[in-house]
Image (cartoon, coloured by chain):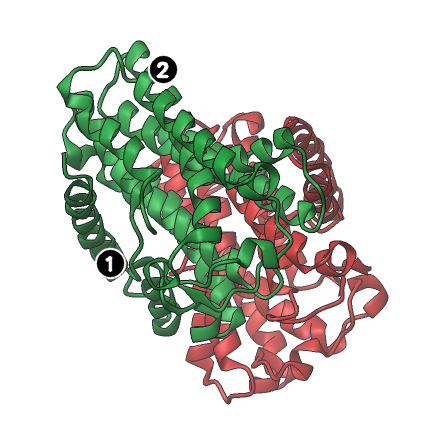
Chain colours: A green, B red
Amino acid sequence: MDVTAYLKQRAEAVEAKLGVLLEALPEAPPRLLEAMRYSLLGGGKRLRPALVLGACEMVGGDRETAMPAACTLEMIHTYSLIHDDLPAMDDDDLRRGRPTCHVAYGEATAILAGDALLTLAFLTAANTGDLRVVREVADAAGVEGMVGGQQLDLEAEGKAVPLEGLRRIHRAKTGALIRVSVRCGAMLGDADEQQLDALTRYGEHLGMAFQIADDILDVVGDEQALGKPIGSDAQHGKSTYPALLGLERARELAEEAAAEAVAALEAFGPEAEAFRALARFVVSRDR
Amino acid sequence: MDVTAYLKQRAEAVEAKLGVLLEALPEAPPRLLEAMRYSLLGGGKRLRPALVLGACEMVGGDRETAMPAACTLEMIHTYSLIHDDLPAMDDDDLRRGRPTCHVAYGEATAILAGDALLTLAFLTAANTGDLRVVREVADAAGVEGMVGGQQLDLEAEGKAVPLEGLRRIHRAKTGALIRVSVRCGAMLGDADEQQLDALTRYGEHLGMAFQIADDILDVVGDEQALGKPIGSDAQHGKSTYPALLGLERARELAEEAAAEAVAALEAFGPEAEAFRALARFVVSRDR
């Protein structure tokens, strides 16, 4: 199973669709649209949309049914990066090897580009024709999910956070969106109750594995591969798994989470091979 | 027809419901929730939710059916004010007689409170059970509507904008949300095609009347009544109707737009009396 090729194929399909969606906005102010395009089509692993499409395919659905939801998740992820990078937040200048949105377009336009992407995400979600998708995404991305996690993360800066606190931050900040990606794909593929439960557990463990691996990469990663400076967590006084537990133990935890993600798929057959490989991939990737 | 009492009654019902919706978020970080509550329940005319409820009632619908959509519109309006007031945008310190959200809670929390309210707005919209509401609101609030208008407004600062350009900015920045408020209420009240068309035209003219009146109040208003300093448009180098046409002509235009709003309701009987009075009210209000 070539995970890189699997992700690349889905990333290309999603990017093509995202491009089409941005083309369909003739009334948008050109500079704002350009800022949205700059951030949305500026690379990235496209993990969340790949999970949407992959979960849909895995339960026997047509990948195209899940394409709007896949785009929704990538738009939400992108808006959150634009706002997180702002001077008042993490104040980061570099993302995916390029200047961040506010460096390239100014702070006001970056704030509005984020707002516009979040709003477009829900327009796109509504176009799935499935209210459950709108509801689940709004729940996962909101004050009890991603945005709440970002707030907790900011409040925790410079403080000693216990492991349970760190888990809560990450479950909200990155976990909720990864979990809902898998769930939306499964729902749009008409998963039955058992499949949806199994895939939800997969998403939860995968999110945890992904986040710990992210923390580790910020310590030992290659700046060239990552496209951003390493050590930024420490610089911002952020609590991370390696800082709290040491690199060795953090690596073990990441491996355990990946193994639990794989275990959640035990009722599936070969159709789950890609997701099994993906779980192993997220803890061994270099970016 | 006592418009003030009409608005007050609907404002109280909406505020009660908004309070309930904010109570139902046990996992939200307390400080972020407090910032959301500070801005969402910090006063205001509640014009948009009143339009949602009023349009629904007018076509014979049950007001409660439209309550979630009314809350959606007020959340979106509030998030847009929080983000507009940010230092990188209009940099305003005072709103409704109180410190703006970023002055009270800091910039990072204010950005996130806006993001959280926008996201909660769509969760609430999904709870109408009507995908059309999600779609229409996302369209009106997005890059071709409100957010796009905000971008155009920022780009126009310090520049001479012709009347048609100013119309376009306002149609997007404030008009789209007022128009969609009326449309959502009408749709949820099961308006027929003709009623929806008439109310849409009403919303368009009302939005125009409202915006011109707003521009005029920023020149001749009473700071105490407005709860914010007057002259801020001129200070920000913003194009306005009075600046472009003079106070006299701007007042005439506002009256004309209000009259056109009233004219759009000609097929309705006494059930439209409140909306007729409201159109006259928006051009004679002092805040």
Marked residue chain, label 1: A
Q: Residue at x 50, y 53 (%)?
A: B177
The quarter holding residue A58 reads top left
Q: Residue A45, percent across and down?
A: 29, 49
Element at label 1 = loop
- The quadrant of the image that shows the N terminus of chain B is top right
Q: Residue at x 32, y 59 (%)?
A: A225
Foreground of the two, B169 or A196: A196
Marked residue chain, label 2: A
Q: Residue B106, percent across and down?
A: 72, 58
Q: Residue B225, percent across and down?
A: 82, 62
Element at label 2 = helix
Q: Amino acid at mark 1?
A: Ala
Q: Which mark is residue B146?
A: none
Q: Amino acid at mark 2?
A: Asp
Q: In 3D space, how far apart are the residues under numbered discs 1 and 2 (Cα atoms)?
A: 36 Å
Foreground of the two, B187 or B235: B235
Q: Residue furthest right?
A: B224
Q: Which residue is mark 1?
A: A24
Q: Is residue B201 left or right of residue A192?
A: right
The quarter holding residue A285 reads top left
Q: Are marks 1 and 2 on the same chain?
A: yes
Residue B139 visible in the current orientation: no
Q: Residue at x 57, y 32 (%)?
A: A167
Q: Is residue A2 left or right of residue B107?
A: left
Q: Which mark is residue A197?
A: 2
Q: Residue B88, percent across and down?
A: 60, 71
Q: Which of the two labelled residues, at mark 1 and mark 2, occupies the earlier sequence position?
A: 1
